[in-house]
């Protein structure tokens, strides 16, 4: 009986356990199905049909190919809104179908007086060995720090042009930072002078390749002026500066205001530079000019910290003493005053005339020097110095010996010749008491430069007068001409010097070589402009053959100009064949006129408001051939 009872109890427990097992399984299945259904509905509703849902017990397994990492993350977030994140198994894969994006290639080149640095990423397919070799040649003895890295991606189409242009800039600019991108080159540099800055800007702008852009910033530091010089004169004809230097804009304004109060007319300017002996330079100069104005006539010279004030003959001695004493007391520390009151010179009857040396410089560069010298040694010294300044072929020296010359005569003569060398043409007269220099110049700094030469070599007490006139047409920087002027000048040149070819060919004949050189000289003075070399033929022969011939001849002229180092970047060639005749092809003279080269300014396309007829007007230069 007891055995039956135990058996029935065991059976009851077994049935209960079996029932619980099946109930748990059914519960898990229900949870799995409901979770899968809910997640599938959520993913479909938010637009992720590529995602499939599987269940493994209470875990939800996500599978499928996500278009991107961002889309995968959004699908996971949508699933987390339905079931707990701990139950989600992420089996997504990602397939980004976008093509691999090449890195941005760029190079920075830094050059100073001690080294060159190369930093950046370059395409491995570029000619990097040649690039490094060219940098080494430019560096010469300077060390080159190479931090370039390479990437195995295709070379950008404009990369070679950008690198070639950057190397040109590196060769020209000794202190520079050059940034090379795929289609742009940015240049920052320091030049030695304003003139050099202009020339470098002009060349770099001209030679920028057509398929890239350039951004150029060149600064010109203020020059070092030594000695730091100012010279102001008041005469019967008015007041003027022979030289004016200032260390700042404020100092220049102070000096010019004092000069205007002393009678100076508008138009003067002070060159700003480094090397001032004292920060009180402007105040010292203004006080000195005011003192001279109180005296009425004479000159005042500042050379570094030395101040020389010379009053003209006839100045009241009492007034002279009063004014110079006050100036001596008012001048800032460091400045030292040297004062002089000129006295009238009485000529003695029978006394030999005062010595005088005269030197002239013609516009063609020929120099004549006439006057006395102390002895044969001084004669040879003066001749050698003149040859050194102007060249042996351009100088004629005629001197005579005289033993009563004042001390320093040779030094005064040589300093005057050096000053004459600063002019395009001029005249120098040297006497024992003064030096007079007059002439024409193409540099606005010539008067200051001449004053510095005389004060440095003759001394601060030197008496001199300058009558130097600046002419813009003599200034090489001001002689640059515009595109229309350039083409017009070439057309005038070719009126009597036509470009010709060998009969029936595209080869320039020997007579045209000189013409090409002359055109290249014109282009050297041209500002950047788009100019086209157009080739034209007569109507003899097939039309296609004439078109090819005209293009080849235009190319030949372009190549000849490039070989002559013409730097215009927008100089192009175009063949027109027989399509644009300017004369009757039925006559020999007409056919000869139609066989031509035209230099034409390429103007921007006119807008609707502009007159297209005016913009299309060409400047032409005629060409003939011997075919």
Image (cartoon, rainbow, N blue to C red):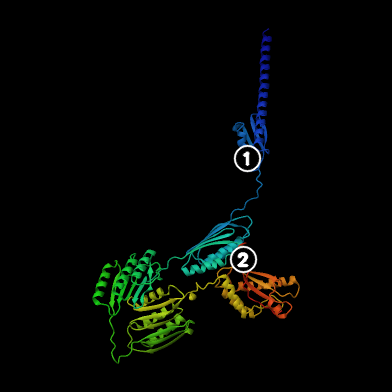
Rendering coords of residue 134 (x, y %): 57, 65
Callout 2 secondary element: loop
Q: Which residue lies furthest to the bottom in this view?
A: 350
Rendering coords of residue 112 (x, y %): 48, 63
Which quadrant holds residue 185?
bottom right
Q: Which label sits on residue 264? A: none
Instruction: Name the residue located 67 percent from the left edge and 9 percent from the top edge.
Output: 5
Q: Which residue lies furthest to the right in this view?
A: 542
Residue of label 1: 72
Callout 1 secondary element: helix
Residue of label 2: 611
Q: Is residue 618 above or below residue 151?
A: below
Instruction: Name the residue located 49 percent from the left edge and 84 percent from the top edge.
Output: 393
Which residue is nearer to you in this view: 524 or 264? Answer: 264
Which quadrant holds residue 258?
bottom left
Of discs 2 and 1, which sits in the foreground? Answer: 2
Q: In this view, does 28 lie above or below 50?
A: above
């Amino acid at each position: 009986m007891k055995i039956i009872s135990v058996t029935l109890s065991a059976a009851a427990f077994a049935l209960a356990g079996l029932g619980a097992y099946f109930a748990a399984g059914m519960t898990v299945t229900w949870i799995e199905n409901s979770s899968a259904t809910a997640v599938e509905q959520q993913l479909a509703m938010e637009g992720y049909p590529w995602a499939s849902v599987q269940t493994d017990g209470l875990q939800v397994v996500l599978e499928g190919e996500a278009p991107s990492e961002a889309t995968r993350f959004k699908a996971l977030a949508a699933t987390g809104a339905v079931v707990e994140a701990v139950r989600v198994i992420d089996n997504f894969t990602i397939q980004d179908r976008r093509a691999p994006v090449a890195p941005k290639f760029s190079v920075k080149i830094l050059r100073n007086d001690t080294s060159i640095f190369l930093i950046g990423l370059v395409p491995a397919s570029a000619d990097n060995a040649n690039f490094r070799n060219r940098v080494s040649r430019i560096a010469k003895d300077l060390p080159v720090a190479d931090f370039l890295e390479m990437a195995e991606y295709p070379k950008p189409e404009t990369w070679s042009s950008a690198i070639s242009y950057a190397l040109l800039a590196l060769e020209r600019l000794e202190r520079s930072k050059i940034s090379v991108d795929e289609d742009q080159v940015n240049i920052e540099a320091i030049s030695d002078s304003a003139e050099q800055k202009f020339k470098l800007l002009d060349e770099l702008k001209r030679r920028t390749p057509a398929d890239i852009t350039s951004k150029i910033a060149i600064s010109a530091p203020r020059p070092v002026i030594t000695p730091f010089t100012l010279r102001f004169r008041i005469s019967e004809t008015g007041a003027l500066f022979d030289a004016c230097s200032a260390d700042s804009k404020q100092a220049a304004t102070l000096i010019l205001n004092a000069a205007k109060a002393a009678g100076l007319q508008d138009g003067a300017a002070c060159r700003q530079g480094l090397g001032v002996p004292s920060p009180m330079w402007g105040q010292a100069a203004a006080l000195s000019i005011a003192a001279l104005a109180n005296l009425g006539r004479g000159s005042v010279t500042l050379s570094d910290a030395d101040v020389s004030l010379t009053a003209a003959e006839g100045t009241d001695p009492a007034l002279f003493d009063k004014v110079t004493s006050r100036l001596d007391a008012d001048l800032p520390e460091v400045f030292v005053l040297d004062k002089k009151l000129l006295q009238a010179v009485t000529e003695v009857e029978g006394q030999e005339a005062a010595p005088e040396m005269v030197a002239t410089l013609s516009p063609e560069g020929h120099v004549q020097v006439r006057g006395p010298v102390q002895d044969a040694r001084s004669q040879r010294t003066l001749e050698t110095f003149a040859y050194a300044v102007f060249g042996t072929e351009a100088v004629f020296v005629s001197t005579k010996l005289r033993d009563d010359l004042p001390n320093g005569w040779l030094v005064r003569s040589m300093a005057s010749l050096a000053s004459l060398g600063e002019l395009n043409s001029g005249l120098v007269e040297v006497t024992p008491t003064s030096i007079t220099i007059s002439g024409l110049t193409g540099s606005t700094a010539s008067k200051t430069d001449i004053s510095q030469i005389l004060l440095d070599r003759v001394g601060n007490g030197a008496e001199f007068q300058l009558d130097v006139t600046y002419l813009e047409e003599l200034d090489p920087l001001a002689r640059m001409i515009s595109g229309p002027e350039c083409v017009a000048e070439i057309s005038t040149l070719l009126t009597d010097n036509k470009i010709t070819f060998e009969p029936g060919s595209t080869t320039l004949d020997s007579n045209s070589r000189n013409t090409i050189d002359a055109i290249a000289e014109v282009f050297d003075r041209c500002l950047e402009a788009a100019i086209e070399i157009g080739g034209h033929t007569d109507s003899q022969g097939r039309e296609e053959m004439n078109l090819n011939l005209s293009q080849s001849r235009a190319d030949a002229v372009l190549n000849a100009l490039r070989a002559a180092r013409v730097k215009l970047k927008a100089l192009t060639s175009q063949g027109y064949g027989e399509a644009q005749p300017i004369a009757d092809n039925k006559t020999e003279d007409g056919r000869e006129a139609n066989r031509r080269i035209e230099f034409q300014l390429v103007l921007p396309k006119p807008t609707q408001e502009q007159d297209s007829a005016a913009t299309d007007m060409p400047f032409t230069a005629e060409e003939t051939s011997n075919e």
